[in-house]
Amino acid sequence: MFPTSNRWPWLHIAAGSAALALTSILLTEWLALQPCHLCIFQRLLFMLMAPLALIAAFTSGWPRRVSGALTALAAAGGAATAGFQTWLQAQPEGTVSCLGPDMGPIEHFVEWLGRLQPNLFMATGFCEDLALVILGLSLAQWALLAFLLALGLSLWWLGDATHRLGTLAKNPQPARSFVAFLVTWSFLLLTITGIVLYIVPSGQVAHWTLWSFAGLSKEGWADVHILFGALFIVAGALHLYYNWKPFKKYLATRISGHLTLKRELVTSLIVTVLLTIGALFALPPVSWLFDLNDAAKSMWARDAEQRPPYARAEATQLPVLAQRLGLDLEAMVAALEQAGIRINDPKTNLKTLARVNETTPAALFALIPKPHKPARGKTGSEDPGTP
């Protein structure tokens, strides 16, 4: 067993992670592999684990514990990702895929990274494909073993450090400061994501135009908002826990020295109830806030081309889309292919085609010939040979 102060476990994790990240990049280039979204995400985790473990190796105290915990968290996430990909690869061919009609947070994040650094993070393959098998194991299985080993080493050291919790209980100031900063950063990110979500277009328009801001889609911003909302609740509870004694002392002083506490409490409660009623029944001035929100969202869809013909039209298969809108499927496919849009699957949808061709469903739909409505006053066919 290594002594607790030994840095060698962390150096092993750092060196192994860096080597695996570099191997992943070189194999992709040398063997012309097509990495999938999960493969790229695992590569990113190895790239993150290397500096985190290196920080843990050459620090002590709280910096080592925090960087070590983050290393363990990244290893756990990598093990879960590699395990899921291993399960996908074990299923019968054509039955499952990691890419459905809607991409998840990992896929959205990898797509964003791919636009920033395509040489490192561009995903072009499918997660269920066995691109390369070494000694009977796929790359996902080798990654799973590496992540589990890193997780075990990280937890071994972190578990051996639990005896220091007694010292933390006697002197909670570092934890109190950490929680205070966590509350601050969570509040800041909640404010930013809240402002963005207040002005984003409606779901139909966002999906139809593949709306994004700062590399994140509407769902991406919502995911970040939900994550830090939950973190803000947890951090707020911890903040109250660490400051419970000063809080009780403040309440006791207020109650014993002033009688306005009751008035302040009742006033704030009345304001809260009035705001809630205003929100439920859309009463002014609360309704003005909702009207401003509607106006901000409607700015994104002033043109008819920015609105889909119906909800989730971008995720509808092309034959169904043609049937619902009365379009000629063959003419629709021919127009798209003439514009350079390759259609390998006849049952694909505009959203998938837009992602592959780096455009939007709205732009693709504009290429499709629409049936012309007969001019007012004319009836029958426009064919001159028809009586």
Image: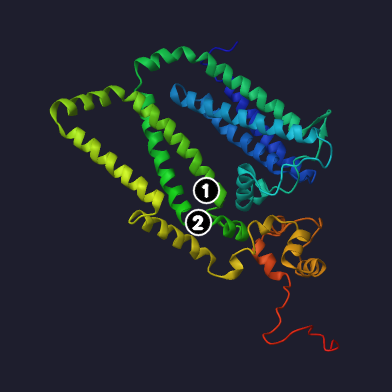
Are the residues tagged 2 and 1 within 8 Å (C-beta)? Answer: yes
| Amino acid type at image mark 1 | Trp
Residue closest to the eye, 194 or 267 = 267
Residue at the image point whose x is 68% and y is 87% from the top: 377
Disc 1 element: helix
x, y percent for residue 290? 41, 56
* Quadrant location of the N terminus in the rendered image: top right
The residue carrying pointer 2 sits among few (fewer than 14), some (14 to 19) or many (20 or more) residues within 10 Å by Cα, namely many
Residue occupying image coordinates x 74% and y 29%: 142
Name the amino acid type tagged 2. Answer: Val
Q: From the image, which quarter does the C terminus lie in?
A: bottom right
Residue 28 percent coordinates (x, y): 75, 43
Q: Determine whether 124 is above or below 302 in the image.
A: above
Label 2 sits on a secondary structure element that is loop
Dot label at residue 309: none
Give the quadrant of residue 76.
top right
The x, y position of residue 307, in whole percent, is 59, 64
Determine if residue 325 is in view: yes
Q: Is residue 196 above or below residue 225?
A: below
Tell me which label, 2 or 1, sits earlier in the chain. Answer: 2
From this view, report whether residue 303 is shown above or below residue 225.
Answer: below
> Which residue is located at x 54 percent, y 57 percent?
202
Colour mapping: rainbow
Counting every numbered tag in the picture gives: 2
The residues bearing labels 2 and 1 have C-alpha atoms spaced at a distance of: 10 Å
Left or right? Give the position of 300 relative to 121: left
- The outermost residue toward the right is 385
Residue 272's x, y, as percent?
32, 43
Which residue is labeled 2 in the image? 200
Q: Which residue is mark 1?
A: 221
Q: Residues within 10 Å of mark 1 (few under 14, many from 20)?
A: many
